[in-house]
Image (cartoon, rainbow, N blue to C red):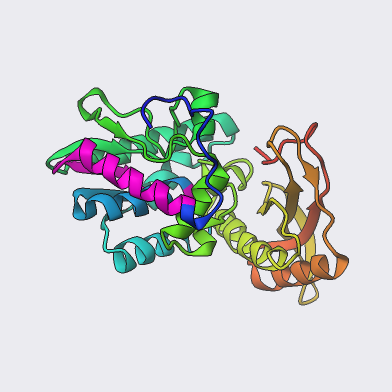
Amino acid sequence: MAGNIRPETMERITTPELAKAFIDEQIAEVRAQVGDKKVLLALSGGVDSSVVAALLIKAIGKQLVCVHVNHGLLRKGEPEQVVKVFRDELGAELVYVDAVDRFLDKLAGVEDPETKRKIIGAEFIEVFAEEASKLDGIEFLGQGTIYPDILESDGVKAHHNVGGLPEDLQFELVEPVKLLYKDEVRVVGKELGLPDNMVYRQPFPGPGLGVRCVGAITRDRLEAVREADAIVREEIGKMDPVPWQYFVAIPDVKSTGIKDGKRYMGWAAVIRAINTVDAVTAQSVEIPWSMLTRIRDRIIAEVDGVNRVLWDVSDKPISTIEWE
C-alpha cells in the first residue's frame, strides 16, 4: 500500500478475517522497510498509537522502542494501563517518562486556551526529543497517522504523532495504519488482542484534561476533573446505546455550597454527552434523570472541591464539543 492515497478498490476492514489479512500484510511491509534497525514510537495510549504499537511489536519485537510521556493531563488510570498492557503483557521496550511536574509548572497561571495548547504541544515534543536523543540506533519513527489525518492535514499530526521534532531527530516514517479509517483501526486493534477499553476509547483531545480544566490549570482542580470524569465515564458507559463522547469539564468559577451547616466555596462540574457523525456538528444526548442524579450524588460525595453538578445540553454549532 504505497503512497498516501487510499485505492478505491481497497476493501473496508470490517471483519476479523480482513483485519488478520491486513495485519499479516503490514508485518511483511514493516519488516521489509525496517530490516534490523530500531523504530521509535510516541505511545500516548490512544487508539491509533496503541494499535500501531501492538502491530509493530508483532512485526519487529524489541526493535520497537515506545516512549510514553505522562504529562499529568491523562484520564484516570490511563498511564498505568499503558504500562500494564504494553510492558507487562506485550513485552514492549517501553520508556515511561513522568513529566507531570514539568508540564504543570509550565502551565501554572496560563488562562488562554490556545496558549495552553501550544505549551502542551511544544513541551511534549521537547520531552520526546530528549528521550529520543538518549537512544542509540534509532532510524525510524512510528506514527499512528490514519487516513482522515492525511485528508485533513497532509499526514502530520502535531501533538502525539510528533510532527515537530528537531532537525537532528528526523527519521524515516513507519505508518502502518495510514490508509485506515478510525473504525477500521478499531477492528485491527481487536484482532491484535488489545483490551476493549483501549480499542473503543472515546475521542480525547491532544492537550487532554488541560482543555477540560477550563482556565488556568491548578493541581487540585485538575484532580477534581480527573475524578469526576472517571465517575461520568463509568455511569454513562452503562447507557444503551452509549453516546459517542461523554466527559466532565470544570470551569474556574466558584459557587457557594453548604457542608456541615457552614457555607463554603466550591466548583461546578459540567457533564457533557454528545452524538456526532463527523464532529462538525454534534447533538446533546438525553441522559435519564435517574442516571443524572446518581452521577450528581457520586461526584459531590466523592470529588473534593465540587459542590454543584451541571448538565450541558448545548449542540454544535453554536457550542463546540470541548469547552476550550
Q: Is residue 191 in view?
A: yes
Judged left or right of residue 17, residue 2 is: left
Residue at coordinates 41% horizontally, 64% vertically from top-left? 80
Residue at coordinates 52% horizontally, 39% vertically from top-left? 11
Instruction: Tell which residue pokes out farthest to the bottom in this image.
Output: 260
Residue at coordinates 25% horizontally, 27% vertically from top-left? 170
Where's residue 211, x and y in %? 59, 42
Residue at coordinates 81% horizontally, 47% vertically from top-left? 284
Where's residue 278, x and y in %? 68, 36
Q: Main secondary structure of the magenta part?
A: helix
The correct choice, above or below, for 301 with respect to 43 in the image is below
Where's residue 234, x and y in %? 65, 67
* Viewer-proximal residue among 82 and 38: 38
Q: How many labels does the image show?
A: 0
Q: Is residue 45 in view?
A: no
Q: In which quarter of the image is residue 34?
A: top left
Q: Does the magenta stretch include residue 68?
A: no
Q: Give the range drawn in magenta.
A: 18-47
